[in-house]
Amino acid sequence: MSNVESLVGEWLPLPDVAQLLDVSITKVHGLLDEKALAALRVGDRRIRSVPAAFIQDGHAVESLKGTILVLSDAGYSDEELITWLFTPDESLRGRPIDALREGRKTEIRRRAQTMAW
């Protein structure tokens, strides 16, 4: 198991994401293409999966897309940006993904933009 796999903990294969979001698998691929979600190949079978924390109340975490875009534009790979989102930060009192889930997107977006420079 890679470091990022254990850091995230719970992963959802793309068909499970489609089911949770009540959309087609094609739509899930579209969400990945438009950077509303990010996925990695994880587990022994290297199945493309999304961190479970990216889904909240039957939707992708609302503020995730902008944050992923900022980090992607800065040259972060999906693995690097997922690692950043799930790494605890004492100054945040938690992880960036938790702050996004709590609706604290301005603070996280500002930090992501700072990292992009």
Image: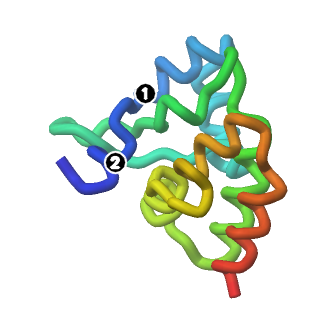
Q: Residue 44: x and y, percent?
A: 16, 38
- 85 in relation to 44, above or below: below
Characterize the local packing of mark 1: few (<14), some (14-19) or many (20 or more) Cα atoms within 10 angstroms: many
Left or right: 28 in relation to 62:
left
- Whole-Å distance between the Cαs marked 2 and 1? 14 Å
Depth check, front residue: 16 or 11 = 11
Image quadrant assignment for residue 60:
top right
Dot 2: what SS?
helix
Q: Residue 16: x and y, percent?
A: 48, 18
Depth check, front residue: 24 or 62 = 62
In this rendering, the count of numbered labels is 2
The amino acid beneath tag 1 is Leu
Q: Which numbered circle lies on residue 84?
A: none
Q: Which residue lies furthest to the right in this view?
A: 106
Q: Which residue is drawn at the image coordinates 74% and 74% (left, top)?
A: 113
Q: Which residue is drawn at the image coordinates 72% and 35% (left, top)?
A: 102
Q: Which residue is drawn at the image coordinates 78% and 68% (left, top)?
A: 110
Image quadrant assignment for residue 56:
top right
Depth check, front residue: 65 or 102 = 102
Say which label, 2 or 1, has the lower sequence index. Answer: 2
Q: Residue 108: x and y, percent?
A: 72, 58
Q: Which residue is drawn at the image coordinates 77% and 59% (left, top)?
A: 107
The reply to whether residue 115 is visible in this rendering is yes
The amino acid beneath tag 2 is Leu
Residue matched to label 2: 7
Dot 1: what SS?
strand
